[in-house]
Image (spheres, grey):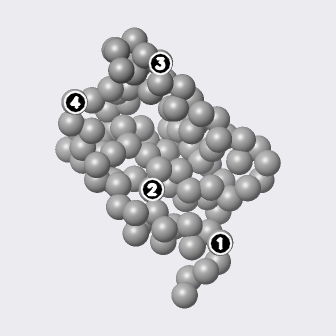
């Protein structure tokens, strides 16, 4: 993909994910937000039952839209996210 198209795709994907999290909160659906370069304290979710999966790196939080290394996103651990989902659904066993 050319730079312009890739950039548009990234922006659309990011926007869709943000809007999905916000819509779920508005509809009172429990959420697990997966955060890379942003801080959930600033960006939500804000309800006590919701969870935020963060995997801090030495540059966290940077709030950059693009990053050549994407260390924070590469640090995401599926098992941790799955555990948070089980936690909010009440399936701790």
Disc 1 residue crowd, few under 14, some 14–19, many 20+, Cα 10 Å: few
| Above or below 7: residue 54 | below
Q: Secondary structure at mark 2?
A: strand
Residue 21 in the image: state x and y as whole percent: 63, 44
Q: Pointer 3: what residue?
A: 8
Q: Pointer 2: what residue?
A: 53
In space, the residues marked 3 and 2 are separated at their CA atoms by: 26 Å
**Residue contact at pointers 3 and 2, CB within 8 angstroms:** no
Choose the circle earlier in sequence order: 3 or 2. 3
Query: Residue most toward the bottom?
Result: 93
In space, the residues marked 3 and 1 are separated at their CA atoms by: 35 Å
Residue 11 in the image: state x and y as whole percent: 49, 24
Left or right for 60, reference 19? left
Q: Pointer 4: what residue?
A: 68
In space, the residues marked 1 and 2 are separated at their CA atoms by: 15 Å
Q: Secondary structure at mark 1?
A: helix
Tell me what residue is drawn at x 47 percent, y 18 percent.
8
Choose the circle earlier in sequence order: 3 or 1. 3
Q: For this rendering, which residue is in front, 41 or 82?
A: 82
**Residue contact at pointers 1 and 2, CB within 8 angstroms:** no
In space, the residues marked 3 and 4 are separated at their CA atoms by: 17 Å
In space, the residues marked 4 and 1 are separated at their CA atoms by: 35 Å
Q: Pointer 1: what residue?
A: 89
Tell me what residue is drawn at x 44 percent, y 27 percent.
10
């Amino acid at each position: 993909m050319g730079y312009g198209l890739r950039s548009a795709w990234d922006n659309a994907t990011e926007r869709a994910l943000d809007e999905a999290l916000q819509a779920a909160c508005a509809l009172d659906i429990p959420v697990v937000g997966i955060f890379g370069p942003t801080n959930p304290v600033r960006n939500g979710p804000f309800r006590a039952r919701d969870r935020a999966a963060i995997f801090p790196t030495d540059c966290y939080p940077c709030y950059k839209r693009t990053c050549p290394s994407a260390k924070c996103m590469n640090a995401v651990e599926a098992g941790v996210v799955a555990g948070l989902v089980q936690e909010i659904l009440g399936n701790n066993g």
